[in-house]
Image (spheres, grey):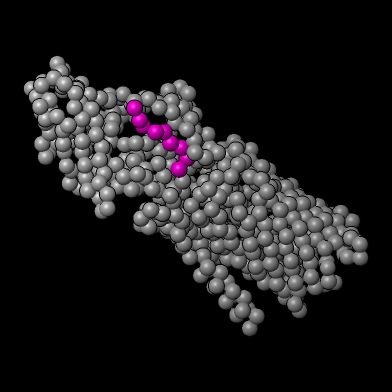
């Protein structure tokens, strides 16, 4: 679940040129290599309040790729090529001795395969697309002496999502707005989830610089096992909820090649890290 | 070349994800702990007092003890902590140990009389959360033939959303590295018990609930008379 959440947050940074309700044109594509990370020493509890925890970090190196098989049908792969999950040493402030040594787990993370289909013409005033996401549990669970490190959630999930959006002028700047809702069905006694999001993008410098703000939310149906009962020792094991906001800048350098940087953070949550996440990446449109 | 710069940046970020240090405040006042305190001792009988020294993180350390009685005509104590009840009356028994710079001591009042009565056989207390996770309840500890039993009553409630919630007996409320692990918590409401062998009612100061995978204390209960 932790990785699922991380990937959801990562998803905040992948929609600009290929996401939302706009499928890729036939033969066109978009590829992005990025690093996403968060380090947190506090988390939202099951009551939505914030408690401390041992400092934990997750670093993900992701490859995201879209390709338009037709003008309406796009295939997407979001692969976590390398994931590092670590926890700090716990030391005594009195003696300086190490009480619990820190640990790290490095492995391939989970992979999402997405099939997106435009329900109307992408050039429509309000394009609408549906997508099916298959979450493959290729990451690792139960790393470390306590089994509390993980680079994947260990469950196969499938999500149906519908996106809609529109382009418009915001003052003198080209802009777009998109929104989505999705249902995420999960296996291994994990709870189902309702997901939704809003996105507003502004083309500050024509064909050069886009600024994008996003709101993303996950609401758990809490119909699976309690977090403590799942055979995962992560505090993000199950029933996680959050609402996050994020900002991202995408700067196109030349010939479809560009740089992106962004951050996001939960403004409310349950059983999730209470710290911002960051991402940097390079992309290429073709 | 741009890709090289980017890969270099990724590599730097990965290096930045090295394991660091978190510190916990785990200081406790050092103490001499009497494991089998006694209220009164029958005239003419003997009793072995068992003690241990707990350092500033609640960890047992070997040390030399110095024993003394305020009136050896009523009760005497030898270098090994064996009390001898001589004649009826009340005395103070003192136990000392030399630390680096100080002398640490503790004492108790002993009545010499017609019977031998141990001081503590039952303790009651309250479990309280130290976080925003639900954890509460009342408990009672009683000695058994083989150890102790902790009876937690029907007021008990605990969040089931914590992975790896464990309960310990500890002499440090913030550190369970030297604690006695009782069990993983699998009861989240209502009365239940833990039977613990080879542990005395005076061995530990706290019941501590820890989220073991994340080394975070969730709640505690003080064990005191």
Q: Left of B155 or right of it: where is B172?
A: left
**Residue drawn where x is 48% and y is 42% of the image:** B163
* Residue A186 makes an appearance in the image: no
Magenta span of residues:
B217-225
Q: Is residue A7 above or below residue A30?
A: above
In the figure, residue B217 lies in which quadrant?
top left
- In the image, B128 versus A87, the foreground residue is B128
Looking at this rendering, what residue extends furthest in the bottom direction?
B1
Location of residue B85 with respect to A257 vertically, above or below: above
- Residue, x 71% and y 53% (percent of image)? A245
Residue A28 location (% of width, % of height): 75, 69
Closest to the observer: A79 or A7? Answer: A7
Question: Where in the figure is residue A2, as x and y percent of width and height?
Answer: 56, 51
Q: Is residue B221 magenta?
A: yes
Task: Name the one closer to the observer, A168 or A269.
Answer: A269
Where's the C terminus of chain B, which quadrant? top left
The residue shown at (40%, 48%) is B26
């Amino acid at each position: 679940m932790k990785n699922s959440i991380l990937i959801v947050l990562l998803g905040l940074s992948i929609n600009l040129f290929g996401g939302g309700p706009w499928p890729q044109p036939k033969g066109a594509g978009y590829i992005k290599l990025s690093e996403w990370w968060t380090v947190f020493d506090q988390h939202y509890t099951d009551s939505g309040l914030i408690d401390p925890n041992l400092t934990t970090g997750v670093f993900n190196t992701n490859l995201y790729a879209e390709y338009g098989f037709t003008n309406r049908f796009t295939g997407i792969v979001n692969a976590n090529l390398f994931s590092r999950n670590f926890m700090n040493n716990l030391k005594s402030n009195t003696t300086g001795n190490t009480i619990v040594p820190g640990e790290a787990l490095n492995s391939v993370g989970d992979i999402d395969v997405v099939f997106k289909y435009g329900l109307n013409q992408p050039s429509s005033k309000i394009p609408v697309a549906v997508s099916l996401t298959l979450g493959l549990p290729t990451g690792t669970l139960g790393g470390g002496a306590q089994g509390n490190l993980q680079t994947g959630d260990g469950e196969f999930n499938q999500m149906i999502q519908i996106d809609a959006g529109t382009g418009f002028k915001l003052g003198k700047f080209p802009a777009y707005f998109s929104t989505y809702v999705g249902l995420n069905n999960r296996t291994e006694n994990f709870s189902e989830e309702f997901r939704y999001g809003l996105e507003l993008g502004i083309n500050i410098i024509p064909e050069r610089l886009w600024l994008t703000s996003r709101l993303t939310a996950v609401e758990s149906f809490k119909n699976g096992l309690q977090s403590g009962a799942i055979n995962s020792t992560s505090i993000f094991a199950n029933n996680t909820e959050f609402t996050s906001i994020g900002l991202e800048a995408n700067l196109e350098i030349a010939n479809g090649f560009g740089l992106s940087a962004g951050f996001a953070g939960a403004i409310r949550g349950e059983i999730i890290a209470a710290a911002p996440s960051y991402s940097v990446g390079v992309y290429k449109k073709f | 070349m741009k890709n090289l710069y980017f890969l270099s940046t990724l590599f730097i970020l990965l290096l930045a994800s090295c394991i660091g240090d978190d510190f916990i405040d785990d200081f406790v006042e050092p103490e001499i702990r009497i494991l089998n305190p006694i209220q009164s001792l029958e005239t003419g009988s003997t009793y072995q007092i068992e003690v241990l020294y707990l350092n500033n993180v609640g960890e047992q350390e070997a040390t030399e003890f110095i024993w003394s009685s305020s009136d050896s005509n009523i009760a005497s104590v030898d270098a090994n902590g064996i009390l001898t009840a001589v004649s009826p009356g009340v005395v103070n028994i003192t136990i000392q140990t030399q630390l680096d710079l100080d002398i640490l001591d503790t004492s108790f009042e002993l009545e010499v009389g017609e019977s031998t009565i141990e001081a503590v056989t039952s303790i009651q207390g309250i479990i309280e959360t130290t976080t925003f996770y639900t954890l509460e309840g009342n408990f009672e500890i009683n000695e058994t033939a083989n150890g102790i039993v902790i009876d937690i009553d029907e007021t008990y409630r605990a969040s089931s959303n914590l992975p790896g919630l464990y309960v310990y007996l500890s002499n440090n409320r913030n550190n369970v590295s030297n604690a006695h692990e009782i069990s993983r918590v699998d009861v989240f409401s209502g009365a239940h018990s833990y039977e613990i062998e080879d542990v005395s009612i005076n061995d530990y100061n706290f019941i501590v609930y820890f989220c073991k995978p994340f080394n975070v204390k969730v709640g505690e209960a003080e064990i005191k008379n």
